[in-house]
Amino acid sequence: MEERRQHDYLSAIQPAEQHPSLHDREDSEAHHTDSLPVRTYLGTGKEPKAPIFNDTDRSVWFRVILNKLAASILPDQPLIEKYLHHMYRHLCVKRTVSRTYITIRDFLHYLQRPLCTITRTDLEAYLEHEQDRGLKLSSVRLKLVTLRACMRFLSEQGTVSPELLIRPLRIKLPEALPKALDPADTKQLLQVIQTVRDRALVLLLLRTGMRIGEVLATKPVEVQLQEQKILIYQAPKTSTGRVVYFSEDARGALEQWLAQRDGSREFLFYGRGNTRLSYSGARMLFIKYLCSAGLAHKGYTIHCLRHTFASELLNAGMRLECLQKLLGHTSIEITRRYARLTDKTRADEYFVAMQRIERGEIDGHY
């Protein structure tokens, strides 16, 4: 009987969904601009093959999550529902709430015990299990952050032991340099893009530094050609707004696309039907053009266009503080990563010193 119950429990819980990374998890927050009009927008640029939620009405998508919870046989459903309500009341976006539900569901699937029995060892074992099955370190860290927030809430409710929070588990991510396109590669890539829509899309990513999700969520009314700027009322990733600007070549490409696009479509870039162009669709387009330009072996991703934007502006003399606002970073330390990539002063000092060493102009014994 126990084996049958356990089998039913496991079969009722679907395995974790695998979503492609947007490569921009470091941009966890964005700059808040009070002058922008307030508008609720809960859409996301990432469109999984089987989307869980399609309705942008908060009450609708939240009921969908609660119905999924009620239809499952997860233990501690009242506690989970209480925590999801807590997130809903604090205006968390649907992607955050749905990710939390999926993370808790998968953790209980692995644990097969009620939440009140969780120990530090359980969390460590689960994180190790996720890494062993090939999940990216950034994704494992996101699961840890999600579970830690849930444990904090449950601790306040007196459900789990506060000892779980005394020495919180941490996962240190490698501090890799952002990967930008070489100027020659950028020129080579643009030369092979002849389709009007695709050229406008790539140039907009390259000249505004917008995240791919932000570009795909853009509507024509938000584009101001004369002022050469786009109003991001509420970014899909961060739910905050900012203004970005685009160059003359991007403006020309946009004018050509706006002149021939279907004016009845809701989004600036659209796919089949009346839907926006999906992230996977934009990604495949970028890969196709990389192959055409002979750059497929260099490991570029579509998010590298954002890195290229930042690197080129720093090389052109833009201040970090200004670039921070354009990229939508709350912390300037995130923006400072690009300074490590484009630090010409450090390079100049190195080569001057190395020339002195090579000429034998230094004194001293070691």
Image: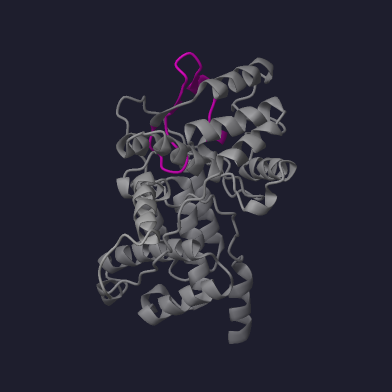
The percent position of residue 230, horizontal first and vertical second, equals: 46, 25
Q: Which quadrant of the view contains residue 21?
A: bottom right
Residue 291 as seen in the image, left or right of residue 360: right
Q: Quadrant of the C terminus?
A: bottom left
Q: Is residue 91 visible?
A: no
Identify which residue is drawn at 58% across, 41% down. Answer: 54
* Apparent side of residue 163 relative to residue 202 in the rendered image (left or right): left
Q: Is residue 309 left or right of residue 320?
A: right
Q: Is residue 260 left or right of residue 148?
A: right
Q: Between 245 and 157, which is closer to the camera in this rendering?
A: 245
Asked if the stretch drawn in magenta spans residue 224, the answer is yes
Residue 325, x across and y down, in percent? 35, 35
Residue 207, given in percent of the width and then of the height, sits at 51, 31
Residue at image location 44% in from the left, 39% down from the top: 310
Going 61% across and 22% down the picture, which residue do you hit? Answer: 253
Q: Quadrant of residue 303?
A: top right
Image position, residue 309 (x, y; %): 48, 37
Q: Quadrant of the N terminus?
A: bottom right
- Magenta range is 215-241
Q: Residue at the spot x=65%, y=15% of the render?
A: 259
Say which of 116 and 70 sits in front: 116
